[in-house]
Structures are given as structure tokens and as C-alpha cells.
Image: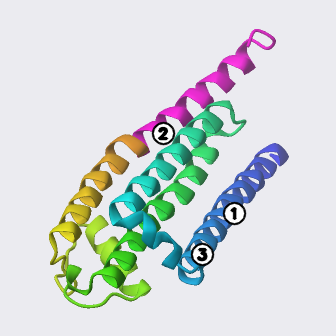
Amino acid sequence: MRDEVAERRARRRTLFGVLLRAAVSTTVLTALYFLLPLDGLVPLGPVGMTTVGLLVVVALMSWQVNRIMVSDRPVVRGAQALTVTVPLFILVFATVYYVLAAQSADSFGGPLTRVDALYFTVTVLATVGFGDITAHSQLARVLVTVQMLANLGMLAIGVKLLTAAARIGRDRRAAEARHPGEA
């Protein structure tokens, strides 16, 4: 009976830790998005920013997959990976749209604040498309199309990779528990 209570408490602590880390990482990334000067990214241009941003997301995901597979708690580590990767993915596109709108006012239906760019990014990700902010220039439409395709990739491939890594890590831990010293 005491073991069950202790186990439930440990699970609650773990869940609380995951939720706390998710809140902190999302808050830090969002604060950086709103506080950092984005003017320095202008020389990269929107296409370069998108490329670099997606490469960073892919690198982070690759690193996370490796960390998940060797983790003592692969499922927890997988959940934590999602809580960093998804907000970063969203903020990459919000940054691109904000800088693009600042560089070329006719790219969207009007000027975009950072909030507008974040809002637009999430409406595209959620496939809601309210229509209050629309891509007008060809470059903006190409970048929004890239985001839509990347959204599908993030959902189909990214989440699958992270969950598969968690499963592999969990299976590895179970095998180690059954046969200690063989791993």
C-alpha cells in the first residue's frame, strides 16, 4: 500500500516537473521572441531565416531523439522534447513573418506586429486561416506554403520520431531490467 502511494506521488512529481519545464521553456522562448532585436536577422533574408530556423529545429529534434533513447525516463523525455520543439518551430515562422512584413510592407494585408506574426503563424499551423491576415506577396505565399508543408512534416514525422524514440528507450530499459549487465 505504501509503495503504491509513493509511486503515485513520484508520478505526480514527474508530471509536475514536465509541466513546469514546458511552461518555463515556452515562456523563455516566447520572451526571447518578444525581447530580442530581430533587425540583425534582416541580412539573412526571409528564405535564409526559414532555412536556418528549420535546420535548428531539425538539429534540436535529432539531438532530442538521441537523448530520449538513452534516457532513464524516455516517455517523460519525449514529452519534454515536444514542449521545446513545437514552440521553437512556431517562433521560427513568427520571426520570419515579422521580419518579412517589416522589410516589405506589401507582403501581408498590412503591417505585422510580433503578436500579429505569432497569431498568423498559429492560425496557419492550426489550419484555421481566419483571413484577417493574409499573405499578399509571392515570397510571403511561398513561405506560408513552406510552413504548411513543414507543419505536416512536424506532425507526421517529428512527433512519430519522438514517440518512437521514447518507445525504443522504454524497451531498452525494460530489457536492461530483465537482463541486468547485458546491455
Quadrant housing residue 145: bottom left
Q: Residue at x 70, y 52 (%)?
A: 11
Q: Which residue is drawn at 25% across and 52% down?
A: 149
Residue 48: image location, x then y, percent: 39, 58
Please give left or right for residue 77 compared with residue 177 in the image: left
How far is disc 2 from disc 1 in space, using C-alphas?
20 Å
**For the residue labelled by badge 2, is the local secondary structure a helix, a strand or a loop?**
helix
- Does the magenta portion include 178? yes
From which residue to which does the magenta span run?
159-183
Residue 70: image location, x then y, percent: 68, 31
Crowding around mark 1 (Cα neighbors within 10 Å: few <14, some 14 to 19, many 20+) is few
- Residue under label 3: 32
- Residue under label 1: 16
Determine which of the numbered discs, if any, sits on residue 163 in the image: 2
Give the mark nearer the N terminus: 1 vs 3: 1
Residue lying at the far top in this picture: please name it.
Answer: 182
How far is disc 1 from disc 3 in space, using C-alphas?
24 Å
Quadrant housing residue 3: top right
Give the mark nearer the N terminus: 2 vs 1: 1
**For the residue labelled by badge 3, is the local secondary structure a helix, a strand or a loop?**
helix
Secondary structure, magenta segment, majority class: helix
How far is disc 3 from disc 2 in space, using C-alphas?
28 Å
